[in-house]
Image (cartoon, rainbow, N blue to C red):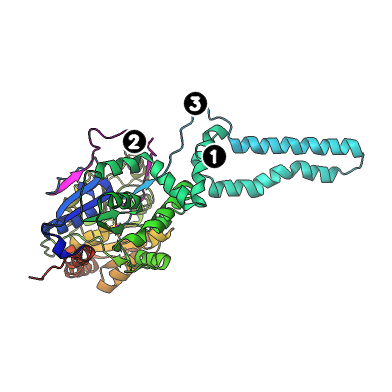
Amino acid sequence: MNDQSLDRRPRLCLISFSPIADDARVRRHADTLMAAGWDVVAVGLPGAKSTPPAWKIIDTLPALAAPSAPEAPQEPAEGAGDGAPDDAVAVVPAASEPQGRPPRSFVRRLLAFCYWRTLGLAQRLQQASGIPVRSIIQRIINLPGTISRRLVTPLVRRFVPQQMKEMTLSQMRSYLPLLKAHVSRKAALDIYWSWGNMQEMYQKAQGVEADLWIANDWSTLPIVARLIEEKGGVYLYDSHEFATEEYPNDPWWRLFTQPVAKAVERTYIAGARHSFSVSPGISKALNALYRLSPPNEVLRNMPGRIDLSFRPTGERIEVLYHGILSPSRGLEAAIRSVPQWRPEFHLTIRGPGSPAYLASLRKLIRQTGVNDRVTLAEPLPMIELVRAATAFDIGFFALLDDSPQNKYVLPNKFFEYVNAGLALCVSDCPDMAELLNRHDLGVLMKSTSPDDIARAINSLDRAGIDRFKRHSIAAAETLCWEAEQEKLLRACNQAIGRTVVAA
């Protein structure tokens, strides 16, 4: 396709497993391309809370859609939307909940069977031979327990998901075929298309015609590829996460989602006219994995500029975390660290979370005795976050560096804090640390332990905070979407052979 073939505005379709109006990255990209003369439509999930954009969103199935395959339930992703984790959806088959008393698990039944068969064999051997081999027999009798304690139990603890440990054999049978994804790419792709949410997203997008498609995250790549095969066009791949290493400490994800993610990305990433990721670390890893040409490029999660003026730090020093509220965001450790903070610091935690998780945070606040020093604030629409953050002094983000995904995180909130003119107190992850040190924006936490969090917070005084705030205001001139968006515009125009003459 070239620019001579387009006698109209080019058409773009973005597909993402997220509520589009609330998805900072997808919405920002669509707004930019619409302003640059594209007709834009996005296909995503329902449930957005933010004001709808000017372009079209498709988030429900067509009225006459054919019934979809049984849905593979979704587990909430850690980390998503942050360029890492706030917006992401981890697609995994879910374990059925046992009703009433859990049945005896298949693993336990198997171990019991082996034990009693071994015991019976040892007793018959002793009776038949009459040889005094009691110590040897005792070892044979104890062998199943030894194997269970020293080998089976550690392996089960490390590799068997909690959801499967109490399954009966009949319950487990429906999951065993999914393990074929580990040895067959075709099987992995078949499993992908067996998940109902993939079928539904494909149905939502079937009525769309586009010159360029943008697949957001690995989970949309096969959908976009199938639509292009049917309708034409070309596609870009926007990898919000390090897909194949996103949850390496979750056995359930490793067993059932990781092999599918690997197969999908390896099959379709090379077909993209261009690909993006959110941080240098993830970009480098993708280029090493797939030897991409053109190479994967970093497109950071930066908000648009707002008018900023310096505000001196007041008598009470306001610390802000905003983003998804979920475990592994360091929130529990932050709350536990507050009693060690100097009395002038106050922590506000703002964002959406499940009712159960919010209740657990409130309980921890009460137990820690910091009701007067920690506030759980109501979430705000994505488009209001930066402006609301300007009322604070320090932007906080503690993330456990326990996976390649977390190690190379470079989230929305980092740049939102900068564009709100805040000092930063964040985890010492390489890509965040590089930017923080280059622009002198704040301090790094060595770990997510309460002691290290408190040590980092207490290292800040008002004069230092004000210095970092001034540096953030200066850095926001370049760490903003207006300075980053040219990468996206260039890639999209090149993908369809469109030549744009600079004004």
- Label 3 near label 1: C-beta < 8 Å? no
Q: Which residue is mark 3?
A: 100
* Point 46% across, 37% down: residue: 95
- Say if residue 313 shows up in the picture: no
Q: Quadrant of the N terminus?
A: bottom left
Q: Quadrant of the C terminus?
A: bottom left
- Residue 139, image x, y percentages: 78, 45
**In screen coordinates, is 288 left or right of 303?**
right
- Label 2 near label 1: C-beta < 8 Å? no
Q: Which residue is mark 2?
A: 68
* Point 49% across, 26% down: residue: 100
For the residue pair 113 and 473, the one nearer the viewer reads as 113
The total number of labels drawn is 3
Q: CA distance from mark 1 to mark 3?
A: 16 Å
Please tell me whether residue 128 belongs to the stretch shown in magenta: no
The residue sitting at the bottom extreme is 438
Q: Which residue is mark 1?
A: 165
Amino acid type, label 1: Lys
- Residue 187, image x, y percentages: 47, 48
For the residue pair 33 and 327, the one nearer the viewer reads as 33
For the residue pair 181 and 93, the one nearer the viewer reads as 181
